[in-house]
Amino acid sequence: MEVYNRWDRLQRLGQGGFFGPEEIGRSAVSRASRIVAQLPGVRLIPGAGMKTRVRIHRTNDCAPSVYVDGIRSGTSDEVGIDDLVPATALEMIEVYRGLAELPGELADDNARRCGAIGLWTQRGR
């Protein structure tokens, strides 16, 4: 429930990018990386094999920190977000492109420089 409170609060402030159950369900794509790439400033880089890396466009072209149900999993270069949680299991996705948007719950050293992606499942809600 905390993520929904944050969603309401930050949407009112115009901070972060959110995809709720309706947007995820309506999306014509089946990968979390393709969903987050719909936001300005987010781009995808093909990786080795099928792994797609997500980058937040900044001066240093950073790999954001990735959280699943509030637990840090690594950066988007270290873990493929499509491999962590299938898009069909996602309840919500939140994307923070910089320090000014970043909530304290997702603020590790890397996220402060490169942003963060939060993936939430039914289980973690």
Image (tube, rainbow, N blue to C red):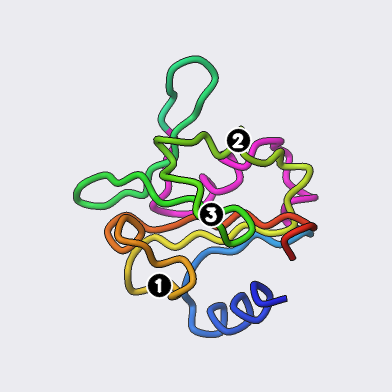
- Frontmost residue, 33 versus 3: 3
> Going 69% across and 37% down the picture, which residue do you hit?
29
Q: Amino acid at mark 1?
A: Glu
Q: Quadrant of residue 7?
A: bottom right
Q: Which residues are magenta?
A: 23-44
Secondary structure beneath label 2 = helix
Q: State the residue position of label 3.
A: 67
Q: Amino acid at mark 3?
A: Tyr
Q: Residue at the location (65% across, 81% down)?
A: 5
- For label 2, the residue is 82
- 76 sits to left or right of 20: left
Residue 40 inside the magenta-drawn segment:
yes
Disc number placed over residue 27 in the picture, else none: none
Q: Position of residue 103 (x, y in %)?
A: 45, 74
Which amino acid, by three-letter code, is at mark 2? Asp
On the image, the x and y values in percent for residue 109 come to 30, 60
Instruction: Name the quadrant of the C terminus.
Output: bottom right
Image quadrant occupied by the N terminus: bottom right
Q: Earlier in the sequence, mark 3 or mark 2?
A: 3
Q: Residues within 10 Å of mark 2 (few under 14, many from 20)?
A: some
